[in-house]
Image (cartoon, rainbow, N blue to C red):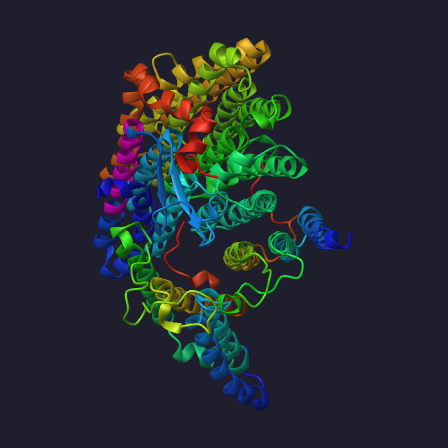
């Protein structure tokens, strides 16, 4: 796929930042507003699609390494399951941080309020982990699918190694 | 009667999806049919949680409004959407692989396994 | 607090951790990855067996994720079952232990079988994800989570079936399985939606307590029965089974057999526990019985004419699923009538549940031995194979045990469960027993054919250099062989100590409900 025109690339330059920031906002506010790890992660992952379309595969793939994404994916998953295991003093996935004070544990007064960001204990931690995982997972899917399209062009599919019958 | 209209839409989308899966010959169209089925299931869950005149179920609004729509079906729907995304991605990857191997998307020609 | 309280959660958490860490451990090279796979599999199996032991000793276990109690109490005093619960009764624990043994054998077998392929850290991640999904389906106490675990298992198995992605057949089989399985999963979701719309709960026990038959419940029941029968590979929708089983790597096929059992578990949980007597005693039981008979007969007749080893075995698994459906359909038929239940229904269910255990063991072993033949000889085509008993004595020995067990030859465990099924189906309708017997004879015939053509006969030049498979693969097969031998030697003990509590748990609807709900709601 070739790069698109300079207009598209400039708009992509501007909007990619907003995508990232909006996605991060949705992830971090996951526990007090509609949204969360998956939704925000999907928004951020759109960045990968936008870059691939606007700049073409050659340029994007030259500075994006799938290994980084795999690492991010594994980190997200591990943080998630570790947070689950740490609650095992009571039950698995028990929210042991909530209401304990500190970064994640502000106590929320009963009744309507404007929302306290650092209040949800492991829930917001897990939202971030899920967000990280979804960003990297979706970007990986897009990148691999893009590579898959390129396989058709040069008939490179046959040179794939390791999967001998 | 108008209250039942959303359920009618769910039924129509469901049948359309089933029809596409059963009769279409193109793999991409079969994938679209599966997405339609997923959409109808999600819509069903959302519609079930609706309460007439209800507002969005956000904690900051509690007390200001009388009724809220049920949040549980929305959580269920989100989970189903996530799963649907994984399925669609895998489905389309498999379609790409099939196209690479067989050079066609017609199900009548992708029949190496039979009997 | 006693750590054994956490066994139900650990049964899911350990394989899930295994799946997530596989990606990291895979960086450490081949030996580390294999060691990780072995450790996690053994840990999972140990946890499931301890779970079974504890449930048999202490009754149904209920575990609530992330909280202490199953219900959520509002300040107004209203309490409602919305928590994510895991509920393990004797039947769930029995199924979990059975399938985790199959998963262990498949993992041992896969170590060397998959050795020459790349991307193995992803293989082991998907493998453990499949184990998680399977165990989750069997021990969850929540309809929506049943759907979630169903989809986890499905997505992982699509990836595993198409793992040899440069084989067009494997991708084709995976696509076929994917269409069938996604459609059936959507049916399950819609049925769950109907039940939620009626009762505002997705907790199995809570819904079962409130359930009374209406249109929405009938639609939900039909959707659930159709979709779960479709997923387990019963006859009207069996066309994915031979493709998927034949094209997946052998260790995965062994696990897929156990996963189809998880769908069957869901079917019986819905019929017996969720609906119970309200499901009616004519339409649904007879549908299941007729599906069972058709599966038995069509599966075995299709198997007899196959020329490829794994495909032949895959058709046999359709016919074995038929036995289980038949037996539990008879149980469902007599659910309303205590006299009939005492006369033949309960025995039929014991036979069916024992057959689930037997079937998982010998079918897994058969698929593994077919994989071993494929690994050593390089082909699965029965026309080309021959004389392998000289080169691969251990594999041949284990194949013979499994084949004798599946054909129902008298001393083996397959005979015991089949005998129970013949006896009881005869009491319902003699023709059913005749169909079961004919199927058994045809099974024997087709396995004699496999044994004769693949292992006996003159040595062939092309297979002169074939040697026995490596020790770790033999170990995987030996695990299953050992279980078959134990079941063969002690059928009475198994029936009274493992199978009977499971059958009792399955028909005890009020026990399942009160274990969660207590006196509440």
Is C46 covered by the magenta stretch? yes
Which percent across, then down, holds residue C513?
Answer: 45, 33
* Residue C246 x %, y %: 47, 39
Query: Can you name the residue that lies furthest to the front here?
Result: C76
* Front residue (pair C495, A163): C495
Relative height, residue A156 to residue C236 (above, below): below
Relative to B78, does residue C7 appear above or below in the rendering?
above
Q: Is residue C119 left or right of residue C282?
A: left
* Quadrant showing the N terminus of chain C: top left
How many numbered circles are shown?
0
Q: Residue at x 77, y 55 (%)?
A: B2
Compare residues C377 and C245 and report the one nearer the observer. C245
- C260 displayed left or right of C230: left
- Tell me where the magenta segment starts and ends, as one range: C39-57
Question: Residue at the location (44% across, 36% down)?
Answer: C262
Give the residue displayed 43% in from the left and 63% down from the top.
Answer: A159
Is residue A94 at all visible to an observer of this figure?
Answer: yes
C425 vs C3: above or below: above
Q: Is residue C244 magenta?
A: no
Residue C458 in the image: x percent, y percent? 36, 24
- Looking at the image, residue C365 sits to the left or right of residue A37; the answer is left
Question: Is residue C83 at all visible to an observer of this figure?
Answer: no
In the image, C200 versus A107, the foreground residue is A107
Q: Main secondary structure of the magenta part?
A: helix
């Amino acid at each position: 796929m070739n790069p698109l025109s300079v207009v598209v690339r400039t708009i992509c330059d501007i909007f990619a930042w907003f995508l990232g920031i909006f996605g991060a906002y949705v992830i971090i506010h996951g526990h007090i507003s509609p949204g969360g790890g998956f939704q925000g992660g999907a928004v951020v992952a759109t960045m990968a699609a936008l870059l691939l379309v606007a700049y073409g595969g050659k340029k994007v793939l030259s500075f994006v390494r799938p290994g980084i994404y795999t690492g991010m994916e594994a980190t997200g998953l591990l943080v998630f399951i570790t947070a689950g295991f740490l609650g095992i003093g009571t039950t698995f996935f028990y929210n042991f941080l909530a209401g304990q004070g500190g970064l994640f544990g502000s106590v929320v007064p009963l009744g309507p309020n404007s929302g306290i960001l650092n209040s949800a204990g492991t829930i917001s931690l897990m939202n971030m982990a899920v967000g990280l995982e979804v960003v990297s997972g979706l970007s990986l899917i897009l990148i691999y699918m893009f590579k898959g399209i390129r396989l058709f062009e040069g008939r490179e599919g046959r040179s794939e190694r390791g999967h001998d019958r | 009667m108008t209250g039942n209209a959303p359920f009618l839409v769910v039924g129509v989308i469901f049948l359309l999806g089933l029809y596409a899966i059963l009769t279409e010959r193109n793999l991409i169209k079969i994938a679209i049919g599966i997405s339609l089925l997923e959409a109808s299931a999600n819509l069903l869950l959302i519609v079930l949680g609706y309460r007439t005149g209800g507002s969005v179920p956000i904690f900051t609004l509690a007390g200001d409004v009388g009724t809220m729509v049920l949040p549980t079906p929305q959580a269920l729907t989100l989970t189903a959407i996530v799963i649907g995304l994984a399925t669609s991605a895998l489905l389309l990857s498999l379609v790409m692989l099939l196209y690479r191997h067989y050079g066609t998307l017609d199900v009548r020609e992708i029949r190496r396994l039979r009997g | 607090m006693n750590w054994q309280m956490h066994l139900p959660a650990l049964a899911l958490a350990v394989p899930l951790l295994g799946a997530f860490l596989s990606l990291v451990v895979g960086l450490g090279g081949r030996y580390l990855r294999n060691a990780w796979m072995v450790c996690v599999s053994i840990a999972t199996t140990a946890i499931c067996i301890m779970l079974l032991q504890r449930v048999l000793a202490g009754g149904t276990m209920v575990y609530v994720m992330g909280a202490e109690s199953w219900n959520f109490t509002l300040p107004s005093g209203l309490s409602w079952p919305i928590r994510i619960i895991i509920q393990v009764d004797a039947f769930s624990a029995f199924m979990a232990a059975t399938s985790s043994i199959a998963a262990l054998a498949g993992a041992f077998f896969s170590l060397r079988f998959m050795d020459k392929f790349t991307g193995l850290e992803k293989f082991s991640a998907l493998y453990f994800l499949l184990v998680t999904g399977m165990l989750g389906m069997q021990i969850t106490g929540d309809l929506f989570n049943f759907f979630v675990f169903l989809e986890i298992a499905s997505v992982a198995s699509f990836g595993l079936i198409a793992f040899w992605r440069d084989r067009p057949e494997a991708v084709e089989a995976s696509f076929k399985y994917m269409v069938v399985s996604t459609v059936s999963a959507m049916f399950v979701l819609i049925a769950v939606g109907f039940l939620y719309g009626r009762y505002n709960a997705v907790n199995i026990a809570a819904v079962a307590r409130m359930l009374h038959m209406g249109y929405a419940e009938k639609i939900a029941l039909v959707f659930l029965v159709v979709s779960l029968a479709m997923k387990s590979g019963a006859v009207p929708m069996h066309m994915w089974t031979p493709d998927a089983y034949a094209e997946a790597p052998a260790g995965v096929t062994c696990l897929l057999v156990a996963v189809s059992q998880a769908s069957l578990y869901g079917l019986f949980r819905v019929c017996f526990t969720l609906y119970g007597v309200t499901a009616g005693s004519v339409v649904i039981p007879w549908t299941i019985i007729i599906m069972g008979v058709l599966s038995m007969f069509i599966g075995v007749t299709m198997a007899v004419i196959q020329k490829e080893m794994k495909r032949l075995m895959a058709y046999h698994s359709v016919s074995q699923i038929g036995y289980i459906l038949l037996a539990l359909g008879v149980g469902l038929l007599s659910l309303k009538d205590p006299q009939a239940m005492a006369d033949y229904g309960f025995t039929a269910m014991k036979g069916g549940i024992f057959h689930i255990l037997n079937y998982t063991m010998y079918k897994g072993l058969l698929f593994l031995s077919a994989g071993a033949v494929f690994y050593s000889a390089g082909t699965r085509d029965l026309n080309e194979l021959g004389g392998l008993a000289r080169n691969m004595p251990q594999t041949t020995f284990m194949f013979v045990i499994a084949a004798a067990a599946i054909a129902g030859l008298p001393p083996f465990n397959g005979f015991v469960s089949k005998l129970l099924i013949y006896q009881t189906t005869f009491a319902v309708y003699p023709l059913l027993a005749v169909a079961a017997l004919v199927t058994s004879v045809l099974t024997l015939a087709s396995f004699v054919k496999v044994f004769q053509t693949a292992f006996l006969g003159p040595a062939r030049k092309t297979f002169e250099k074939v040697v026995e498979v490596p020790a770790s693969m033999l170990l995987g097969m030996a695990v299953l062989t050992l279980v078959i031998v134990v079941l063969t030697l002690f059928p009475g003990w198994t029936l009274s100590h493992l199978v009977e509590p499971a059958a009792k748990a399955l028909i005890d609807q009020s026990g399942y409900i009160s274990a969660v709900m207590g006196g509440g709601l």
